[in-house]
Image (tube, rainbow, N blue to C red):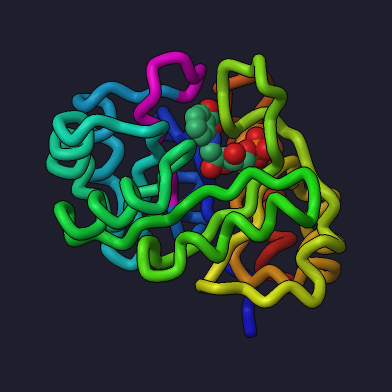
Amino acid sequence: MPVTAKICGLSTPATLDAAVAGGASHVGFVFFPPSPRHVTLDQSAGLAARVPDAVGRVGVFVDPEDALLDQAIAAARLDAIQLHRATPERAAAIGARTRLPVWAAVAVKTRTDLETAHAFRGAAQRILYDAKTPEDAKLPGGMGLRFDWTLLQDFSHPLPWALSGGLDADNVAEAAAISGARLVDVSSGVESAPGVKDKDKIADFLKTVASL
Ligand SMILES: O=C(O)c1ccccc1NCC(=O)[C@H](O)[C@H](O)COP(=O)(O)O
């Protein structure tokens, strides 16, 4: 089975085009003002218009209000909602209201953290295993942190899932081999500075993923 990739936190037409040209299966737009990758509704609309139908548009949110979700879904014509710091109850309510697939981010540092994923069965359609960020960090993702990929070995996944956290062109093959991931997600590993995506790094990452 091939490995596919989501390039997260895109905010410029040139880097979005690089992700699409390189074969990304999904692109992610971050709707969270404290993030250096935050896009406005207008920006997201312009970016979304460049995305072919075959590529999934994923909106990334941190415990969002309904109003923001509605505005972002309409502006960026989202295909899926990625939720960070949301309870299973809130994830289920968002899925029921928006009728879009929900990707629940599960922050992982230990094996015990993984068990959280089970609570999302019936409430989300996909789990995104991401590295747990420090309690005082302003962002729950996009910090280039990785977790121990061996934790995912022999884990009984409750839902389809993706691997995230600290991936880059140099380690994604090892990460996929160890974890068994068939969908990988990257943000800072294809940047030259926080929030600044790099077309060449995107191309390198996607080339490596295509070879797996
Ligand atoms: O990327 C952000 O700035 C961000 C902000 C708020 C919530 C989530 C965010 N990113 C989520 C992602 O899907 C990232 O791709 C994921 O955390 C991996 O990031 P990285 O370790 O930098 O590749």
For residue 197: magenta? no
Position of residue 199 relative to residue 2, above or below, is above
Picture residue at 14% right of the left edge, 30% below the top: 67
Q: Is residue 175 left or right of residue 22?
A: right
**x, y percent for residue 23:** 52, 61
Q: For residue 11, what is the image quadrant?
A: top left
Q: Quick one: 169 or 75, which is closer to the camera? A: 75
Magenta range is 27-37
Q: Is residue 76 left or right of residue 83?
A: left
Position of residue 6 relative to residue 126, above or below, is above
**x, y percent for residue 178:** 85, 68
**x, y percent for residue 192:** 68, 24
Q: Quadrant of the N terminus?
A: bottom right
Position of residue 30 relative to residue 34, above or below, is below
For residue 30: magenta? yes
Q: Quick one: 53 or 181, which is closer to the camera? A: 181
Position of residue 166 relative to residue 115, above or below, is above
Q: Quick one: 56 or 59, which is closer to the camera? A: 59
Q: Quadrant of the C terminus?
A: bottom right
Q: For residue 194, what is the image quadrant?
A: top right
Q: Quick one: 14 or 196, which is closer to the camera? A: 196
Picture residue at 23% right of the left edge, 30% below the top: 65
Picture residue at 24% right of the left edge, 52% below the top: 93
Q: Which quadrant does ligand 1 occupy?
A: top right
- Secondary structure mostly taken by the magenta-highlighted segment of the chain: loop
Question: Does residue 77 show up?
Answer: yes
Q: For residue 142, what is the image quadrant?
A: top right
Picture residue at 59% right of the left edge, 61% below the top: 162
Q: Is residue 120 left or right of residue 178?
A: left
